[in-house]
Image (cartoon, rainbow, N blue to C red):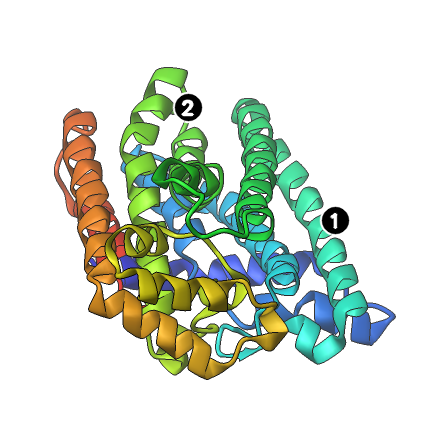
Amino acid sequence: MEFTEYTAKHADKIYNKIKEYIPNREPKEHYEWVAEYTNRRGKYGRPGLIVLWCELYGGKVEDAILPAATMQASEDWILVHDDWQDGNSLRRGKPTLHKIAGDYFAVNAGDAMHMVNWKMAHDAAKKLGQRGEEFYNRFYQMLLVTAEGQYYDMDLTKRVKDIRKFSLDDYYRSISAKTPYYTVYGPMQFGAIVAGKGSDKELDKIKEYGYPLGVAFQIKDDILDCTADEKVFGKSIGTDVYEGVKTAILWHFVRNAKEGDVRKVEAIYKKDRKDKTPADVKTVIDLFVQNGSIEFAKEKMEEFGNQALKKFEENTKNIPEGEIKKTARDAIHHMVKRIK
């Protein structure tokens, strides 16, 4: 079974579990906004990894549903805040919440969902018994690290105005504290914990392949931000250029393009977001393509993706081949090769 089929198979159970926790009371409009992103039904990749890795390590699907719902609920409030911070206009194919409700109401709705999320985490931990404390503590650590990652991301974006003054290591640091942990190896580790295989040694083995996979996933996301069809992608395109995000694509461009082209892009990046036009964004992306910077990013993505696949095979030798392991392997391929 392909990973997308697997996540779809369990998506309704996860969605319904989240809905159980969102209050149905006054003020009605407020709770409609609290549930807005939940009701849009994301791709469920992160909760899908929890359920899948639980099965991979011999656990029961039913034990993983509430932890998976807890993971998805965290995405539903984090994205509300991220969209507001980044000035995004599209999320899951519809206008972002702050565009619909306004900044103040959107952030408040995100805060409320955050509160709901901790109730879910508490209940998941209680239900897991002896495994619950490990799940709860690692869930807390993951979200704390995710906020640190957002800091690094905003620091590199907002404070480093000169596109010539950041390194590839700066870029990796800005994504490593967020995407690999939150999107990939954190959910995988939760699945193993739910299955009762949460030893430090086993969780470290998961990180060894989950980390490079997360880096590959983020690089792919940067590529899609330049090349995807917005209607297919389901979120705003060109956001990195609008926001001034420092990516591996930009790093390569600065070091390989003609000085005149670098100055042209530099001038656009120095503009405030509100002053950048779609034509500015197109200019930058076209120059990225012309100078091989998108191809450079693809090579890096494949490098990290191949590293992840190799480590997965090495670190799961003790897990027998079967349908679940094939699906886990497909999940790794899917996260690198995805087109949307």
Residue 184 vertical placement versus 132 (above, below)? below
Image quarter hosting the N terminus: bottom left
In front of the other: 2 or 262: 262
**Toward the viewer: 298 or 178?**
298
Image location of residue 279, percent across then percent down = 43, 83
Q: Which residue is at 25% across, 59% downward?
A: 293
What residue is shown with label 1?
Answer: 115
Q: Is residue 86 visible?
A: yes
Q: Secondary structure at mark 1?
A: helix
Which residue is most to the right?
26
- Residue 228: quarter of image: bottom left
What residue sits 36% from the left and 56% below the top? 250
The percent position of residue 135, horizontal first and vertical second, equals: 54, 30
Residue type at the position of mark 2: Gly
- Disc 1 crowd, CA 10 A, few/some/many (<14, 14-19, 20+): some
| Vertical side of 74 occupied by 105: above or below | below
The percent position of residue 331, horizontal first and vertical second, equals: 26, 51
Residue name at image x 40 percent, y 18 percent: 199
Left or right: 21, with 289 as reference point: right
Disc 1 or disc 2, which is closer to the eye?
1
Q: Nearer the viewer, residue 260 or 37?
A: 260
Label 2 belongs to which residue? 198
